[in-house]
Structure formats: structure tokens, C-alpha cells
Amino acid sequence: MRDFSDLTERDVLALAISNEEEDSRIYADYAEALRAEYPGSANLFADMAREENEHRRRLIELYQQKFGEHIPLIRRQDVRGFVQRSPVWQMKELRLEAVRRQAQLMEAETLRFYRQAAERSTDASIRKLLGDLAEAELVHEHVADELMEKNVPETVRAEEDEAARRLFLLRVVQPGLAGLMDGSVSTLAPLFAAAFATGRSLDALLVGLAASLGAGISMGFAEALSDNGSLTGRGAPLLRGLITGLMTTLGGLGHSLPYLIPNFWTATTVAIAVVVAELAAISWIRWRYMDTPPVAAAFQVMFGGALVFATGILIGNS
């Protein structure tokens, strides 16, 4: 790799050409990847790709006037300290806001780099060229704002934000809620059955840990294998399985860990309080994200949890 300050005027211009070409292809990839779910933003990135191509054309014309027809291949990765880009294929999940932020960073980083490079340059011609490139990026940044207003008005932005919210519900909230409910409710019976059968905190803790981890592994695999997300849009199965498994384990550990307290009745009192807090949290999530009426959400979760809790106590005391 070479330092940017070591590049000649010819090298800097060649680097700017490859920079604009790469950014254009990234924007075109964004447009293609977003077109099905976010057509307004897809139009935005398609226009930005065309703008980058226009910048590249102007840079090539200038290069031909000064240095001839051959343009050496100088890329970002060949220059130390140059800004890097994340192409679409490296992103595990293409989220709308993440793409918008990446596009803003692309323009801002390139602008800042050119300005800083111009300030460090002692050669007048290179300094002028870098300054011109910085001004071009500044103009492009304003064009991007205008394109956003043109292609993504408030109504379209609201629709796309709502679509992003629905995808978040499908890919994160629903699998997480399913895991949390299973872990918080299904582990109640074995935990409290062991607690009241033995009267010892350590025995209850071991059963609670086993039930929580076992349920987490089982639920994680079940969620990951149930749907590959290709038709339902629920996202990567491994990610959903991981979310479900972790939340299931967390739900069971919440009321198992109080049995670290040696005194059995103190531990049981704390565990019961944790159970009430867990069920209240699940009710709130169902009301907040799943549009379930608050009274119905509380009744369904609390009633089901109470039945499982009572089952554990009855079995433990039998």
C-alpha cells in the first residue's frame, strides 16, 4: 500500500475515477436489493448511481485531456488510509435504515478524506485537484438530499418505515417473544415441582438450569428448522433460531437463579416475584408490538402462567 500523499496528480485522478465507479456499482446494488420492498428508496439509489457515473465520465474526460488514454488501476485498497465501502453481498441482512446511513457515510467520508488530503498536500496542482474533488463531493451530497426529497416523500417514507417495522416484528420480536414465553412458562412446573418436592435451593437450581438450557436448545432448533424465510420474509433461520433459543433460556433462568440463595423460602419468594415480573413483561410486549388489547394480553399470559405454576406446586407437594 502507498500513502495518499505519495500519489501523483495522475494517480489521484485515476483513484478518483475508480472511486466513483465503485460507489456507482454499490448504489446500483442497493437499488436492486431494495426494489421489491422499498421501491421509493430503490429509485433514490438508482439516481445516485447515475450521478456517480456522471462524475466518473467528467473525471475521465479531464484525465484524457491531461494524461492520455491509459488509466492505471488504482483502487481504495491500494492506498493507505482511504475510506472503505461495504458491498451488498457482505451484508447478512439488508436493512433500510442501515443502507441509508451507509450512503450518507459514503459521501461524508469521501468529502472529509479529500479535504484532509488537500490540507496536507504541499503541491499546488495536487492541492487544487483535491479541493475540486472535495467540492464535487459536497455538491453530490446536496444532490443526494434533493433526490431523497424527490423519490422518498413523507408518505413513501412512512410506508417504508412501516414495512421495516413489520419485518422487525417478523424477524426479531415474534421469535424472541415466542422464546421468552416458552422459557418463562414451560420451566415453571419442573422448577417449582423440584423445589417443593425437595425443599432445597440447590436441587431446584439444578433442575431450573437444566430445564432452561434444554428448552432453549429445543426451541432454537425448532424455530430454525420450521421456516427458511424464503416465502414468509421472516429472515435468516439461524438468526431466528438463535434469538428464540437465547430468549427461551433467559426466560427460564430468570426465576431459576434466585435459588442461588441458600435459604429455601427466601429464594422461593424472590423466584415468585421474578415470575410475576416476567409475565408482566410478556404481557407488555404482546400489547406493545403484537397489537393485543392490554387486558386480554395480561389475562392470557397471567392465567396460563398461573396454571403451570400451580401444576408444579401440586406435583411437588404430592
Image (cartoon, grey):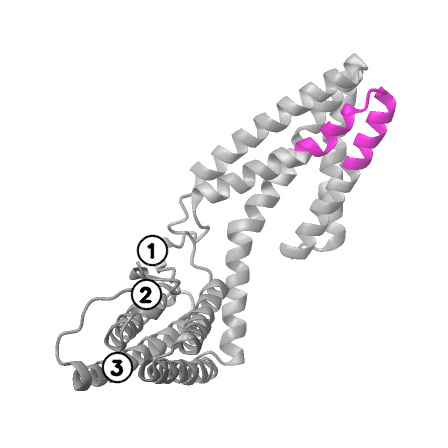
Q: Quadrant of residue 76?
A: bottom left
Q: Report the magenta stretch's main SS.
A: helix
Task: Report the amino acid beneath label 2.
Answer: Asp
Q: Position of residue 208 (x, y in %)?
A: 68, 24
- Tell me the SS state at disc 2: helix
Magenta span of residues: 252-274
Looking at marks 3 and 1 on the same chain, the residue that comes earlier in the sequence is marked by 3
Q: Residue at x 71, y 25 (%)?
A: 189
Q: Is residue 34 above or below residue 278?
A: below
Task: Report the amino acid beneath label 1.
Answer: Trp
Q: Which residue is mark 2?
A: 29
Q: Which residue is mark 1?
A: 89
- Taking the view exactly as shown, the residue that stands out farthest to the left is 69
- Mark 3 vs mark 1, CA separation in Å: 28 Å
- Mark 3 vs mark 2, CA separation in Å: 22 Å
Q: Which residue is mark 3?
A: 59
Q: Position of residue 83 (x, y in %)?
A: 40, 65
Q: Position of residue 136 (x, y in %)?
A: 37, 84
Q: Are marks 3 and 2 in contact (CB under 8 Å)?
A: no
